[in-house]
Image (spheres, rainbow, N blue to C red):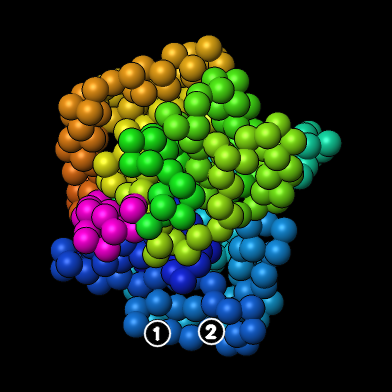
Amino acid sequence: MKIAIFTETYPPYINGVATQSYMLKKMYEELGHEVLVVTVGSERQQKTKLVDGVVYVPGILLKKLYKYRVAIPIGNMRKKFPINFKPDVIHIQNEFGIGEIGLEVAKKEHVPVIYTLHTEYDKFLFYIGLKHFTEFSRNISAKYFTRFSKNATIITSMSAKAQAYIDRQKVDKKVVVLSNAVEYKKFLPTPERIAFRKEFRKKYGIADSTKLFVFVGRIGAEKNISELIDNFMYCDFPRELARLVVIGGGPDLEDLRKKVASKGFEDRIYLLGPIEHTQIPKYLHAMDYYTTASLSEMHSLSMLEAMASGLFALVKHDIPNENQIISGKNGYQWDSKEDFKQVFSHVLNMSEEEQAQLKANVLEYSKNNDFKKQAQELIKIYKLAIEMNNNELAKKRAAREKRRARFLLKNK
């Protein structure tokens, strides 16, 4: 099968979509498929170029939007775009310029579109700064983003939240929910990671018996880190018993640091700032539990990476995603500040044997979130989309022939 993946983000850019796109290309090729990735190159890039099965299209940098680079599919770019690759199916991962190009190529080549929804954009626009223009942001979602769901043969997502979003768009389609995945073997213990645990704890004066709870992600409003910090301060655990570590950069980082300092919690809550993604596995191995208060996730890749590192997850209850946490197997969920205290106290009061069992449980669970399994499931979806598209094309051909026959009969 010839597969074209259209994604606005791709390594070396680091985020969940970039990682998934890279891994899908790798897995598909291992399964014997031919893959072309279409993405955005450097903002300095003037011409489209093809390197190792990846087409890099010129784009611009949006500094205020996660520093995304986006393509602008207007003018001569559409004419310059090289379509020597004749795909059997197109998989669109992002809704901006590259996604637009994907829709255009699909229309030209008469091939099906798989559209993966990673974000509820009406809520996303609210979080990134359109708080005072809620109606405006919803109109953008309705008029622009709906094009992708309407033109998709099949819509996939990693969360049931996507169906609610599609329903709000008033698009009559069912979303296929497919769990997110990680390359879990990359997060297993190594001698270097075991040594780093000791180094990290020595640097911050943390005993090995002290339990570290970690969050990894963008430090922005959508991650609800302020509530996580408030709850941890409310619990007021002794520093010898528990501490909170927050890893990541973002617009709220300095404000949160000031908040922690003003409450006198600098010795129990650490905001480390951004850390290179390649270094994250060793930091995770210095921790004991993963925690998040975010309700903006579809299926958190950071959480899955933590689980693959053996970290049990303590997360805020998110009703559409509640089946992502299996109590006692990969985590626990909490609702209120009191629930938070109860859940954290519960794991802190466990014996070493009980905590070791939690780690074994979550490592076993992580084996099910493998990229190869995800790739195999997506191939099945691609085949179904091709069949659906072929049937639709056949109906259109039959309708054209019928109209042509009527025209010829009428003009005899």
Q: Please say whether residue 273 is visible from this viewpoint.
A: yes
Which circle marks residue 51 in the picture?
Answer: 1
Instruction: Magenta stretch: give its range.
Output: 183-198
Residue 242: % across, % down: 45, 31
Which circle marks residue 48 in the picture?
Answer: 2
Viewer-nearest residue: 196 or 274: 196
The residue sitting at 82% across, 38% down in the picture is 133
Query: How far apart are the two marked residues, 1 and 2, measured between alpha carbons?
Result: 10 Å
Q: Residues within 10 Å of mark 1 (few under 14, many from 20)?
A: few
Considering only vertical position in the picture, is 205 above or below 190? above
The residue sitting at 43% across, 43% down in the picture is 206
**Left or right: residue 255 compared with residue 297:** right
Task: Answer whether residue 184 is magenta in the image.
Answer: yes
Q: Quadrant of the C terminus?
A: bottom left
Viewer-nearest residue: 303 or 188: 188
Farthest right residue? 132
